[in-house]
Amino acid sequence: MTIQSDYKKLLRRNKDLRVLQSAEDVVHWDMETMMPPRAVELRSQQLALLSRMEHKMSTDPEIGKLLKQIAASPDFDKLGQIERRNLHLIRKNYDEQTALPEKLVEEIAKQQAIAVNVWKKAKKARRFSLFKPDLEKLVGLIKQEAEILMKVKGTSTPYDALVDLFEPKMTSTEIDRVFDGLRKGLAKLLPYISNAPRQPDRNQLKRHVPVEKQREISRALAETLGYDVTSPRAGGRIDETEHPFTTGRYDDVRITTHYYPDDFSSSIFSVLHETGHALYDQNLNAEWKNQPVGSPCSCGIHESQSRFVENIIGRSKEFWEGFLPKLKKLAAPDLDKLELESFVHAINDVKPSKIRVEADEVTYSLHVIVRFQIEQDLFSDKVKVSELPTLWNEKYQEYLGLKIEDDSEGVMQDTHWANGYFGYFPSYTLGNIYSGQMLTKVQQDIPDWGKQLAEGKLEAIKSWLVKNVQSRGNLYDPAELMKTVTGKELDAGPYLEYLKEKYSELYGF
């Protein structure tokens, strides 16, 4: 047997695993969008079975045998960068999955499905006490997973092992360092904005726009950005859910949003955000389809793409110079009186809010820092699940100056913990920081990109993102990718500079 034949066997096995995962994606999508209430028990069993199947496929001893044979081959040094990266990612997944007991994997998957369903009911009832028992059970299971993965990954803490699942080779110490600098920079910037003489009028964003018109606006935004949801060759769709998300890869990438008749801007920016995710998933290198290297780099890099589209493009004056006439036409006569300058100022209103997904661009990262700090305390056993609402409320008062009235607008506002996604939240703010560093490079490479945007020409900026980030898939770990793209180490400075320049012009300080 040659090294190439062994390598091809590994890739065939990996393809089967990716196809199974894509089926699991659709099942999760249905659970959040179309599933009837009574189906939750069956759905938890389906997901548990799929997770068990995925675990069996990932831990097949034949994979270990093939990896060992390839590593021992005299031709190993002749393998190229892509082949070596694929082998590294397969080995990483194999080592982690073989360390996890099948029973634990199945229990986590089943409890995730149950916890999400209970979270929805508890959030509606505004009572954390209804959610607490199932969250405690899930946290206990995730802690077992983290303890096992810490040894495999060689991280210094169980929480770092969870962070590594979403942001490979990133540590909580490094995140603390960068987040601390960001938090201090935001603390200096916010008073300038709140005390500025020129404040926006948000009332224009509260004009009533029927949901059906908002659906048309969503489709138009998707089309403008190049996310096809209408043609016979469409690889995407837009549906509705409690908490917007994106799922899928390559030819089947689905996004979701929510519509509020008296807050049309909410769906606009959730669609922009999720379309940013979808474009990444659809623009992965087609030649690497179903290979490990043909997957996204990390959740933080994924967020950099969604935040770039949502904020750097979608909240810019230049974008709305091109799209506002179309928005007014689609919403006519409801938005006939919107004017460019005041509208752009309104969608960039900075005011501390209780809900992360509705937060402005400046204060958003403070929401994430709160969650990051709570997760660290939870997984170092400094705080119990029963204490989460109190700790949450205290931090919102400290960081955002807000009093949380009930658990629905507080600790239960996000679905992530119900899904067991501990270690995920830092990715959001890392994405902001990455996007700031990318913007600096974009401005060097495409000096007139803003002018092009104002003319409705998105090809140059989209091509830059595809070439430099999206098509590179998982060829690098995130820190290495950022160094390759920007030539710089992780640094919140460019993002803070972007915010300062943008908001000083908007607010007049």
Image: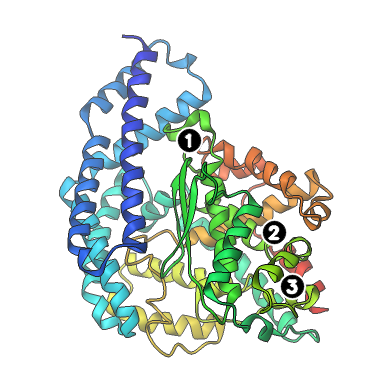
Q: Is residue 296 above or below residue 146?
A: above
The tag earlier along the polypeptide, 3 or 1, is: 1
Horizontal placement of 356 versus 482: left or right?
left
Q: Residue furthest left?
A: 103
**Residue 307 percent across, percent down from the top left:** 60, 59
Is residue 179 in view from this perspective?
A: no
Give 33 or 366, whichever is nearer the viewer: 33
What residue would you read off at disc 1? 294
Q: Earlier in the sequence, mark 2 or mark 3?
A: 2
Task: Give the Cα distance between marks 1 and 2.
Answer: 26 Å
Q: Quadrant of the N terminus?
A: top left
* The quadrant where residue 453 appears: bottom right
**Is 268 left, or right, of 77 in this rendering?**
right
Looking at the rendered structure, which numbered label has been put on residue 266? none
Cβ atoms at labels 3 and 1 below 8 Å apart: no
To which residue does mark 2 refer?
Answer: 313
Disc 2 packing (10 Å; few <14; some 14–19; many ≥20): some
Q: Secondary structure at mark 2?
A: helix
Secondary structure at numbered mark 3: helix
Question: Looking at the picture, does residue 114 appear above or below residue 350?
Answer: above
Q: Nearer the viewer, residue 52 or 392?
A: 52
Residue at point 38% right, 82% down? 408
Q: Is residue 75 left or right of residue 461?
A: left
**In which quarter of the view is residue 371 placed?**
bottom left
**Residue at x-position 39% and y-position 78%:** 411
- In this rendered view, identify the residue nearer to me: 263 or 483: 263
